[in-house]
Image (cartoon, helix red, strand yellow):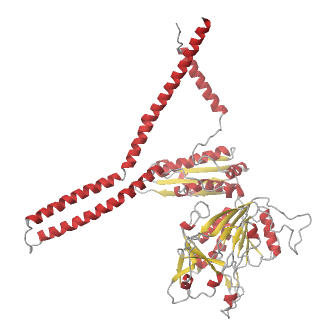
Amino acid sequence: MMKRSTLGGGALLALALLFVGLTILFDYSLRGWRVDLTQNRLYSTAPGTDRILKSLREPVNLYFFFTEKSAAQLPVLKTYGGRVREFLEELAARSNGKLRLHFIDPQPFSEDEDRASELGVRGAPLGGSGGTLYFGLAGTNSTDGHAAIEFFDPAKEEFLEYDVVKLIYELANPKKPVLGWLTTLPMTPSMDPQSGQMREPWAIYSQAQQLFNVHPLDPAATKIDADVDVLVLVHPKNLAPATLFAIDQYVLKGGHIAVFVDPIAEADTSGVDPQNPMSAMSADKSSNLQPLLGNWGVQYNPRQVIADAKQALSVSLHENEAPSRHYGILGLEQSNFNLADVVTAGLSSVNVAMAGYLEPAKGATTHFEPLLLSSNQAQPLATERFAMLFDPSTLRDGFRATGKRYAIGARITGNVKTAYPGGPPAGVTLPPGTTALKTSAKPLQLIVFADVDMLADYLWVRQQNLFGQHVAQAWANNGDLVLNVLDNLSGSADLISVRGRATFTRPFERVEALRRSADDRFRSKEQELEQELRTTEEKLTALESRRNDKSSVILTPEQERELNRFQDEKLQVRKELRNVRLGLDEEIRRLGTTLKILNIIIVPALLAVIALLVVGWRRRRREQHALLQIKRRT
């Protein structure tokens, strides 16, 4: 007879000890190993983030202020707080000890609360005596510099990695970025030759001076200094070949650049005679930065302006004139922004005037990503249509929307070659011992806009006189856009490469699809029943008014029966209406029940059946093997 072996108590104890031992062994040997199995790679960092963390030379202290008790009243913030904490822990684990992470739960009237305010983290008061919620991040470096994210807004979750890594980068590189600002327009403080008085700087130039070290460059410059972090070109009109070559070499060395060109720059008064208004018709107000833009993979026509019927703003070109819609002056909204790019994601409105459009050039080796787009009710028009335009309504004549959306601003990245493959242009002499670069040492980092007037004060800011001081009050986000661009480009290429990511919270896509489908099916029936209900109530009201009207006769039996019938119909319609509204969520409830049955009953049952089949198959194999051994012995 075949004997069946069973595991005794000693064998079970040995297996338990083996399991514990393997657990301890794996805990030590696999420490630091991480596998991100989430669909959107939420716990993976961008390659640029990893390079920034590896480049940290000195420790950076991060203080995460999060009020647990207050956040518990808001489930969304509580969940997002856990997401932020886990992300910070992931960064600290990848930093080789350079990021020192501190978690602080500020209590009311405590030193931690004072510390949060001191470092720039603001508390958000909660109504109903819910206390104050702190949900921000502060950082300090070895030179007592500090930076902060005042409050983590769940609406900006996709830029969580960028915002945190930017804070770390600024602490690790506390030097103020340098802007090389080259313009052919009077943006800087200067003397107005017509009035003989000092001209105020443009508001955007003043704001840039507050945040950056701005070095004005001569439009005839033949060299871009190596310490320039971002080169800003505003209306680069008729630049000399030597200047274009200097810009070309700066970009090939890895310099970052922001460019503003325009088919018609209203702020350009060069070539216009104040005594002769007609001179404005022949004055060339365009800029194009050729051959550089084309060499960088950007196609731009300085003889065409984008007209947009949907985004057109109402303006008055002359005093005492009623406003009319100007197809060339556009008010761009969130639907016109690239919400996946950090420089445009948080904006609400940007105004442009007589803007051109940009396209990727054929055969370009660079990546073209639009930042600002027209609507699909746009059409390019010749610049001649806008010369001496007295009546904006004439732009509608012959207007035919193409159905295409045109890029007014774009980000360009990638490797490029020099625009001067034959060497420096005539008249340019290189310093002894240097050679001209032929290809880019680092990928191109360019943001270009086909409009210059977006920088002008009249499109986004109002100047007010407050106690003798000029105060600029913004009414559009033009300034925010430009500062976002400069802030983004002034970081390293690694920081620029950190882009928006998917959000932590995921919608119930199947449930939403069912809800939309049910809503479409039942909405027409609901409207029909509501109309029937209104009609029935109107008839009831008419009969009731006759009953209550003292001058009228008492209702006849037929009218009484009609009244009762209408009341019954009203009850029936109300019942059907309730059933329809309940039916909107019926499929969702069925889906929930199905999922519960699958997760609680069917899936465990399938696993149990599979386990039993495997056990039976293994037992059968053992029995067959035992029988085979017995036959061999006999």
| Residue under the point 60% across and 47% down | 41
Q: Is residue 517 above or below residue 275?
A: above
Q: Is residue 104 above or below residue 393?
A: above
Q: Closer to the camera, 22 or 528? A: 528
**Total marks placed:** 0
The structure residue drawn at horizontal position 58% and vertical position 88%, both measured from the top left corner, is 390
* Outermost top residue: 634
Residue at the outermost bottom position: 275
The answer to whether one can see residue 281 in this image is yes
Vertical comparison of 501 with 600: above or below: below
Residue 282 placed where, x, y %?
69, 88
Let me know if residue 70 appears in the view.
no
State whether residue 470 is above or below residue 20: below
Q: Is residue 623 left or right of residue 554?
A: right
Q: Pick the residue in front: 179 or 563.
A: 563
Q: Position of residue 610 (x, y in %)?
A: 50, 29
Quarter the C terminus occupies: top right
